Amino acid sequence: MPSASPRRTADPDRRYMKTAMDAPLLEREEELALATAWKDHQDEDALHKLTTAYMRLVIAVAAKFRHYGLPFPDLVSEGNIGLMQAAARFEPERGVRFSTYASWWIRSSVQDYVLRNWSIVRTGTTASQKSLFFNLRRLRALINDVSSGALTPENRAYVAQALRVGEDDVERMAARLAAVDRSLNAPFTEEGDGEWQDLLPAESPTPEAEVMKGRDGERRTAWLQDALSTLSDREQLIIRERRLREDSVTLEKLGEQLGISKERVRQIEHQALGRLKNALTEKVGDPADAGLIPAG
């Protein structure tokens, strides 16, 4: 199937622009009447007339953010969301022009979209970071700092004072804006020798480490079984139930099972641990270093 031509793809955008520019401006009284009709009576025709009149405002705000490299239609769409939010929250009785109130919502919506999509790494999460993101380039232009890298100490101090943020924050944001997102599948060189993802450390154990871990586990199990064989049946039961289970059995429950007091169980456990440790020490040295004696 042939792809849509650029002209046909752009037609909806052109129609939107034409509709926005052809929409009549509203006088203060008419704007107030439409806003009141929508708020008090949910008059959708009034809402349509009110928002259509200010679609040109959406376009004007979106145009100020085109240099961030995001599709202009997407910016306009986000601006329209802000316009609808303004219409939903507007309170006509406060005596403020809807256009003034809507401007804030439109700009906020577009800014949030830019922050979410300018980079795969989230850029601004606090008010000061957002202010830095949207004003750093403008302030650098004012002081004729046209470089894309680090700021001089004087320029960094100027920006920090103008935006009331820390100089470290200014430096980090300048570095962030100068960087570009890099695909992990991008090759190191034009010859394609390796990709950037090859530099990421592996979090899972290597096959060799898994084999060594398995062998060490088998060896420790054999040592422990040999040491346990030096204990009596009752001592082995107490050690297994109290030390070798994830959910150890209580002294009281073991006492009921063996027909002795829980204090006697504790004494036998203590004596058995001492004998077990001695048996292991003869084989492997300090059993704690080998992870053979569970912590008590």
Image (cartoon, rainbow, N blue to C red):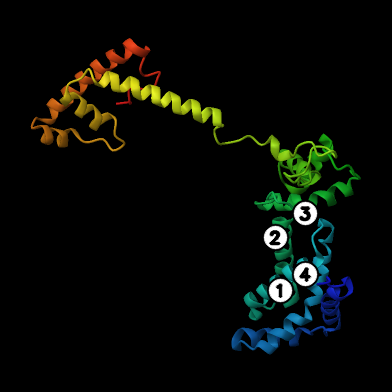
Residue labelled with disc 2: 112
Left or right: where does residue 89 sit relative to residue 270? right
**x, y (%) of residue 66?**
83, 61
Q: CA distance from mark 3 to mark 2?
A: 11 Å
Q: Nearer the viewer, mark 3 or mark 2?
A: 2
Residue labelled with disc 1: 83
Whether 221 is drawn above or below 74: the answer is above
Q: Quadrant of the N terminus?
A: bottom right
Residue labelled with disc 4: 76
Among the two numbered marks 4 and 1 on one chain, the one whose residue lies closer to the N terminus: 4
Q: Which mark is residue 15?
A: none
Q: Secondary structure at mark 1?
A: helix
Q: CA distance from mark 4 to mark 1?
A: 10 Å
The three-letter amino acid code for the residue at tag 1 is: Leu
Among the two numbered marks 2 and 1 on one chain, the one whose residue lies closer to the N terminus: 1
**x, y (%) of residue 61?**
80, 67
Q: Nearer the viewer, residue 121 or 165?
A: 121
Q: CA distance from mark 2 to mark 1?
A: 14 Å
The three-letter amino acid code for the residue at tag 3 is: Phe
Q: Secondary structure at mark 2?
A: helix
Report crowding for label 2: few under 14, some 14 to 19, many 20 or more residues within 10 A (C-alpha). Answer: some
Q: Secondary structure at mark 4?
A: helix
